[in-house]
Image (cartoon, grey):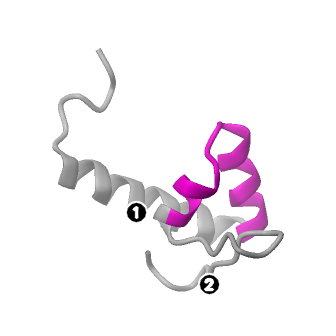
Amino acid sequence: MSRMECLNREQVDRLADLLLNMCLHFTEVQYTESILRARGFGDTELAALGFDVSSGWAEMDPCVEV
């Protein structure tokens, strides 16, 4: 059983947004990207989170909530 199975889609989305905002608040965008890529996330997933993956490094304003 997955840890997230007891949550509905909206709750998972809200949780992902919150965790991303927390990570961006405490780290640089490039560090956040490197963590996500090291865990197996690619351009598709990063773009879905709001990263601009068209350049070499993903870009995102860390002060803006996703």
Disc 2 on helix, strand or loop? loop
For the C terminus, which image quadrant? Answer: bottom left
Q: CA distance from mark 2 to mark 1?
A: 14 Å
**Residue located at (69% from left, 77% from top):** 59
- Up-down relation of residue 36 to residue 26 (above or below): above
Marks 2,1: beta carbons within 8 A: no
Please state if 32 lies on the left or on the right of 2 as rendered: right
**Residue located at (66% from left, 37% from top):** 39
Q: Main secondary structure of the magenta part?
A: helix
Name the outermost residue toward the top: 1
Q: Nearer the viewer, residue 60 or 21?
A: 60
Label 1 belongs to which residue?
17
* Amino acid type assigned to the residue bearing label 1 in the image: Asp
Residue 33 screen position, x and y as percent: 70, 58
* Amino acid type assigned to the residue bearing label 2 in the image: Asp
Q: Which mark is residue 61?
A: 2
Disc 1 on helix, strand or loop? helix
Q: Which mark is residue 9?
A: none
Question: Is residue 23 found inside the magenta-colored segment of the image?
Answer: no
- Up-down relation of residue 53 to residue 32 (above or below): below
The image quadrant that residue 61 belongs to is: bottom right
Q: Nearer the viewer, residue 54 or 17?
A: 54
Q: Which residues are magenta?
A: 29-47
Please state if 5 lies on the left or on the right of 37 as rendered: left
Question: Is residue 44 found inside the magenta-colored segment of the image?
Answer: yes
The numbered mark, 2 or 1, whose residue comes first in the sequence reads 1
**Residue located at (29% from left, 59% from top):** 14
Residue 36 screen position, x and y as percent: 65, 48
